[in-house]
Image (cartoon, helix red, strand yellow):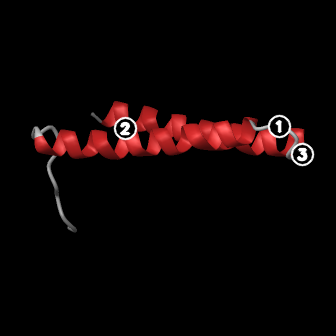
């Protein structure tokens, strides 16, 4: 489960980085930045749902503050 979450974070950061790159390169003349940010939001929502489902099926457990 840790590997899947780590991969999701890498995808989110990669999408955010590509959005920054497209913003700097295109200077707002194309919609590639919007598509990259839309993908980032989609990855974030998918990660959130994945964590909820994993908790529901007992794959992860809350540990609290130690």
Q: Which of 25 and 63 is in front in this view?
A: 25
Q: How far apart are marks 2 and 3 (CA)?
A: 33 Å
Image mark for residue 30: 1
Horizontally, residue 5 falls left or right of residue 9, namely: left
Front position among marks 3 and 1: 1
- Tell me the residue at 88%/39% (across/down): 25
Say whether marks 3 and 1 touch (CB < 8 Å): no
What is the crowding at mark 2: few (fewer than 14 residues within 10 Å), some, or many (at least 20)?
Answer: some
Q: If you read the primary sequence from the N terminus, does the residue marked by circle 1 or circle 2 appear first?
A: 2
Within 10 angstroms of label 1, few (less than 14), some, or many (20 or more) residues?
A: few
Element type where label 2 sits in the image: helix
Would residue 19 be found to the left or right of residue 64 on screen? Answer: right
Q: Position of residue 47 (x, y in %)?
A: 37, 41
Q: Are marks 2 and 3 in contact (CB under 8 Å)?
A: no
* Residue under the point 79% across and 40% down: 21
Q: Is mark 1 on a helix, strand or loop?
A: loop
Rendered residue at 34%/47% (across/down) = 48
38 to the left or right of 66: right
- Residue identifier under label 3: 27
Point out the frontmost of discs 1 and 2. Answer: 1
CA neighbours of label 3 inside 10 A, class few (<14), some (14 to 19), many (20+) = few
Give the labeled residue for mark 2: 5
Q: Is mark 3 on a helix, strand or loop?
A: loop
Which of the marked residues, 2 or 3, is nearer the chain's N terminus?
2
| Residue at 51% from the left image edge and 45% from the top image edge | 41
């Amino acid at each position: 489960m840790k590997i899947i979450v780590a991969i999701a974070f890498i995808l989110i950061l990669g999408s955010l980085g590509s959005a920054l790159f497209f913003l700097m390169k295109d200077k707002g003349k194309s919609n590639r930045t919007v598509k990259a940010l839309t993908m980032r939001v989609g990855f974030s929502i998918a990660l959130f749902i994945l964590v909820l489902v994993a908790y529901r099926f007992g794959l992860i457990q809350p540990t609290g503050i130690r």
